[in-house]
């Protein structure tokens, strides 16, 4: 989703860390593999091979003393918390080390062969997905929401953030922005984190408690450019989206994406549809 960092020092440091991770976790880079980068070059990932299988290796970096936190610990905590029936990569091994003022974490996971549904978080054209795919996605998100929250796992967003962001980006609409029901969520459910035709849900590092219905609301917002599939999401997740809790989750997601529109072109192109949907939600709230 992100480009290779412009800073040559970051590229050199992360490539060296990735090479070191292959030694620590006894794997080798796959020939001709394409690497992927996280925001500002803070992570790098690529396919590798082990003695028994193909795998995916991801390396995170942070200045010493600033490692830790939700995204740093998320993959390991998700592996320890979530039921095995949720379709996701399995964490095989990990390693931590420090070098020249930077802390590193390497995570080796099972390799997912199915392609992602979209190269970007939003869906820009129709894709054909079987009924079984939709059923499995609905079961997976319901299972996540029903899973007890791990002790001390940070929230995807804070209550204070909801209170501040909805009025700032949607206006003072007379909506009670207090979240009364927090449940476990993936936290970043969009089309670049879903594969097809075999469903796998990728990138669990940001999981945590969120307003109930957050994952369904998040995916719906990123599907607005394709009305037919957006309607399918509303039908599939009607049990949460058609509730007051689900409506607050949708307003929260709308505010998040409108805030992101100030920073990147993907969310900027999505913003008009998100804003229009938010206004529909607010009108529905006033009329109900």
Image (spheres, rainbow, N blue to C red):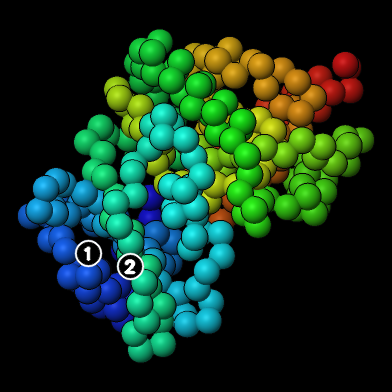
Mark 2 Cα shell of 10 Å, populated few (<14), some (14-19), many (≥20): few
Total numbered labels: 2
12 to 213, vertically: above or below = below
* Displayed quadrant of residue 257: top right
114 to 209, vertically: above or below = above
Q: Position of residue 190 (x, y in %)?
A: 48, 36
Q: Of the numbered discs in the image, which one, if any, rests on residue 25?
A: 1
Element at badge 1? loop
Name the residue: 29% across, 78% down: 13
Query: Nearest the camera: 179 or 32?
Result: 179
* Displayed quadrant of residue 45: bottom left
The mark nearer the N terminus, 1 or 2, is 1
* Residue at the right extreme of this rendering: 174
Q: Is residue 192 left or right of residue 211?
A: left
Whether residue 105 is visible to the viewer of this picture, yes or no, is yes
Q: Of the numbered discs in the image, which one, if any, rests on residue 95?
A: 2
Quarter the C terminus occupies:
top right
Q: Is residue 244 left or right of residue 145?
A: right
Name the residue: 17% across, 70% down: 23
171 to 230, vertically: above or below = below
How far, Cα to Cα, is label 1 from label 2? Answer: 7 Å
Name the residue: 43% across, 20% down: 136
Query: Nearest the camera: 204 or 46?
Result: 204
Task: Check contact, mark 1 vs mark 2: CB within 8 A.
Answer: yes
Q: Position of residue 143 (x, y in %)?
A: 54, 28
């Amino acid at each position: 989703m992100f480009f290779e960092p412009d800073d040559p020092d970051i590229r050199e440091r992360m490539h060296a860390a990735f090479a070191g991770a292959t030694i620590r976790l006894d794997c080798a880079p796959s020939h001709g593999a394409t690497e992927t980068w996280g925001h500002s070059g803070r992570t790098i990932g690529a396919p590798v091979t082990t003695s028994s299988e193909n795998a995916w290796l991801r390396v995170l970096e942070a200045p010493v003393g600033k490692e830790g936190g939700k995204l740093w610990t998320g993959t390991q905590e998700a592996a320890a918390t979530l039921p095995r029936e949720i379709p996701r990569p399995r964490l095989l091994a990990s390693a931590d080390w420090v070098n020249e003022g930077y802390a590193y974490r390497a995570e080796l996971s099972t390799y997912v062969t199915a392609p992602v549904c979209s190269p970007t978080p939003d869906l820009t054209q129709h894709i054909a997905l079987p009924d079984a795919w939709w059923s499995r996605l609905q079961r997976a998100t319901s299972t996540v929401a029903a899973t007890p929250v791990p002790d001390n796992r940070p929230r995807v967003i804070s209550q204070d953030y909801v209170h501040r962001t909805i009025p700032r980006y949607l206006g003072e609409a007379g909506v009670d922005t207090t979240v009364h029901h927090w449940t476990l969520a993936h936290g970043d459910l969009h089309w670049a984190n879903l594969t097809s035709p075999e469903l796998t849900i990728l990138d669990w590092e940001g999981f945590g408690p969120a307003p109930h219905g957050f994952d369904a609301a998040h995916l719906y917002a990123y599907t607005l450019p394709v009305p037919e599939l957006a309607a399918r999401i509303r039908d599939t997740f009607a049990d949460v989206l058609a509730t007051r809790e689900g409506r607050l989750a949708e307003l929260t997601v709308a505010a998040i994406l409108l805030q992101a529109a100030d920073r990147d072109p993907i969310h900027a192109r999505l913003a008009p549809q998100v804003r229009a949907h938010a206004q529909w939600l607010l009108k529905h709230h006033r009329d109900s």
